[in-house]
Image (cartoon, helix red, strand yellow):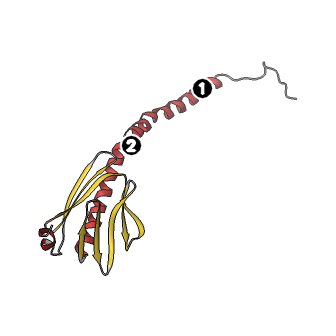
Amino acid sequence: MISKNVKNMNNKGFTMLEMLYAFSIFLLIISFFPLTLKYFLDNEQFELRTKRMEWHVFVNQLKKELRLSEELDVYDQRIILKKHGQNIIYERYGANLRRRVDSKGHEIVFQQVDTFQFSRIPDGVKLTLRDLYNQTYSISIYSYINLENDYASQ
């Protein structure tokens, strides 16, 4: 017969060991807190690095498409490339820069755009862009298309 009497129960130091074990787990969890706090505070730096990579991908795509195009029309807020009978348009859509083919489709090529401007230069186009993080990007892209006649006439 099991008696439920306090005198018969023996917990010699068990609660102290259990408390130390729980406290060590608590300290282990708390030790990761500064690392997670640093991650949340450095999230903007991560976003800036991501934007820079997005810029490089966008520029390489635009360079390739411009060099393979047959004709180029440059406007302040839009660029139209003619390639294989299709009109490829790069334009602003909300806070994004998008690409469309024959005024159809909706391919986002750069996100979180504050301002941008295309301008014609001899044998190419210059793009200046500022994103919502106030980072300014600029690139001059040259084409194999003979654009000097078009440039001189403006």
User: Residue sitting at 25 percent across and 63 percent down?
Assistant: 75
Q: Position of residue 115 (x, y in %)?
A: 30, 52
Q: Quadrant of residue 107?
A: bottom left
Q: Residue furthest bottom?
A: 84
Q: Position of residue 91 (x, y in %)?
A: 33, 62
Q: Position of residue 148 (x, y in %)?
A: 12, 71
User: Which of the image's four quarters has the C terminus?
Assistant: bottom left
- Viewer-closest of 56 and 92: 92
Q: Quadrant of residue 84?
A: bottom left
- Viewer-closest of 56 and 85: 85
Q: Quadrant of residue 106?
A: bottom left
Q: What number is the disc on residue 43?
A: 2
User: Residue sitting at 28 percent across and 55 percent down?
Assistant: 116
Asked if disc 2 and disc 1 are in contact, CB closer than 8 Å, the reply is: no
Q: Residue furthest front?
A: 154
Pointer 1: what residue? 19
- Circle 1 SS class: helix
Among numbered discs 2 and 1, the one appearing first in the sequence: 1
User: Residue sitting at 39 percent across and 71 percent down?
Assistant: 103
- Viewer-closest of 146 and 49: 146
User: Residue sitting at 46 percent across and 36 percent down?
Assistant: 32
Q: Would you say 7 lies left or right of 72 here?
A: right
